[in-house]
Amino acid sequence: MTQDLHGKLTVVDGLIVANWSRSLFQAMHDGGLTAANCTACVWEDFPTAMKAVADWKSWIRENSDLLLQVYTTEDIRRAKAEGKVGIILGWQNTSGFGDYLPLVQVYKELGLGIVQLTYNTANSVGCGCYESRDGGLTDFGRELIDELNRVGILVDLSHVGADTARDAIRYSKQPVAFSHCLPAAMKPHPRNKTDEDLRLIAEHGGFVGVTAFPPFLKKGNDSSVDDVVDAVSHVLNLVGEAQVGIGTDFTQDHGRDFFDYITQDKGHARQLTEFGDIVMPDGFRRIEDFPNLTAAMERKGWPERLIAKVMGENWAGHLHTVWGA
């Protein structure tokens, strides 16, 4: 039953930051992914960010038997119909724009669909979750959100500091998202979100993608796929079933250098946190294991309607609201 159900679903992963390759794209396809927010940039400046987008264009062209680029939610539907994986280009920082707002439109036309305001620390927009003092959203940050709203790029607040995130939730004219997070009520951690903040984003029409990244799960590396479903259930109980999805944060095929890069400020400065060895949840070790997540929801007695929403329909609906197509 599970494999049949999973095969029918529109499956959207709200964030993957893997080591991109042909084998990784095949893993996404084998896992039954319809579309995913694929991190193209973390700390990059404009020239490096533009090169990263160019690289993605090449990968999509060279692997067109597996991939297609997503510009609108109709492309997500097309990916499902054609048995391909839809690639949503996403950034986990706004450094690629520099201070030049007209670049937002340029990147939108290149297919950039989701942008996180800050990555862990402060930038010209606001503060990150590991910053010792959160000064909130800057005036430039408000201008940038206005432009992201105008062109139809989803504002992501997953690694953003709590005060900056609250400012953005309240300021943005379009609903925003925590694309990949977990509840602080289940494990206190700078990257996890309080129940109050989860309710706040939902009250403003926003979205919550629940991650499977083990440092943020209650049992850490001893977690299982059932623990991921329990975290989803916690969020569902807070915000309702229409504004919750999955954002795994899979780092598949990355080595130690990558984790050193993402746990230092700007990729090379002060150490922000230590993850140690990363062991993804039992039963959900790899992207290929996505059907096991559907199976775990079935074991919990979830109706097919709810599984379909959480596994991807909710993401598709939220993106349609923000993108306008």
Image (spheres, rainbow, N blue to C red):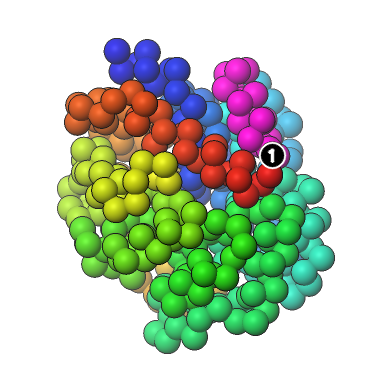
Q: Position of residue 122 (x, y in %)?
A: 53, 79
Considering only vertical position in the picture, is 145 above or below 50? below
Q: Nearer the viewer, residue 26 or 297?
A: 297
**For residue 248, what is the image quadrant?**
top left
Q: Is residue 218 left or right of residue 130?
A: left
Judge whether 25 appears above or below 191 on screen.
Answer: above
Name the residue nearer the viewer: 21 or 131.
Answer: 131
What is the three-letter code of the residue carrying label 1? Ala
x, y percent for residue 84: 59, 23
Number of residues whose C-alpha sits closer than 10 Å to that of mark 1, classed few (under 14), some (14–19) or many (20 or more): few
Residue 54 within the magenta-colored segment of the rendering: no
Taking the spot 46% from the left edge, 72% from the top edge, the residue there is 166
- Residue under circle 1? 325
Q: Quadrant of the C terminus?
A: top right
Q: Is residue 76 magenta?
A: yes
Question: Which of the 4 quarters of the picture holds residue 303?
Answer: top left
The magenta segment is: 67-84
